[in-house]
Image: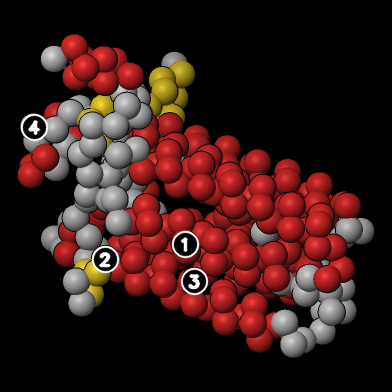
Amino acid sequence: MITAFALHLAAIPSPSSGTLELGPLRLTAYGLMIALGVGSAVEIARRRAAAVGVDPDVMSKVGLWSALAGLLGARAYHVLTDVDRFKGSWGDVVKIWEGGLGIPGAILAGTFAGLWVVRRNGIGDGVGLDIAAPAIPVAQAIGRWGNWFNQELFGRPTGLPWGLRIDAQHRPERFADAATFHPTFLYESLWNLGLAGLIVLLGRRAGGRLRTGALFAVYVGGYGVGRLWVEALRSDPATTIAGLRVNTWMSIVLIVGAGGWLVLRGQGAPRGTD
């Protein structure tokens, strides 16, 4: 009994509210985390651009268009992979502030938008992608904390000391009696920060031995690996294909695609000639 009480005290608490009231202005923590993540990513990309002789203002444009496209792509992915939830209440599709963004959709849409901007400014695709490579997982790491404020997308019940306390009204019906759950938002946040650090380290250590675009491929594959094991811990309902969650399949696609690209790209032009 004492041990259980100690674990309860050690558990991660959940916020009592996901909104911040500033006079008549009502801000959602979910939106604030996304904005903070995007802002941080843009600043990182600007500094990396300046370091390789690319106009930092171009990366600001990349950040703007990628953020807008990524937001739309993320929401579209979420809706399309959970369409039954919205049947009969299609107005909820626009309620992004309540949560529900699919990162794979954000990656796809944001990448295309970013490439459109760099091409218009005469920057090679691989160069632009590599500049953004560590910035994107930092944005994701920060944005994931929006799930903490919303008490959503947590994992299965756990008795581990770092379990996440979830209020009764947010628990899945089948886990109504459980008090603490895997903090998958935290797992993914830490994984993404580690991935960003790895990308920066590879860029510094490998230098000219890397091909342009390789760092971005490491990001895509690394994110896929992280999402694969985090997804296995999730407890929220999800659309499945052949018994696996859609996001699990998408993670596999990202891993295979990035790995295949790295193998094929290894026979291509040296870094800096893109």
Question: Measured along the vertical axis of the image, is residue 230 above or below residue 239?
Answer: above
- Which mark is nearer the camera, 2 or 3? 3
* Dot placed on the residue nearer the N-terminal end, 2 or 1: 1
Distance from Cα at disc 4 to Cα at disc 1: 31 Å
Quadrant the N terminus occupies? top left
* Residue nearest the observer in this picture, 250 or 252: 252
Which tag, 4 or 3, sits closer to the chain's start?
4
Q: Tag 4 or tag 2, which sits nearer the N-term?
A: 4
Quadrant assignment, res 152: top left
Q: Which residue is mark 1?
A: 225
> Quick check: 90 above or below 269?
above
The residue type indicated by label 2 comes to Arg
Answer with left or right where residue 248 lies relative to residue 274. Answer: left
Q: Position of residue 63 (x, y in %)?
A: 66, 54
Crowding at label 3, few (<14), some or many (≥20) Cα neighbours within 10 Å?
A: many
Residue at numbered disc 3: 255
Is the residue under label 1 in contact with that under label 3 (CB below 8 Å)? yes
Measured along the vertical axis of the image, is residue 210 above or below residue 167?
below
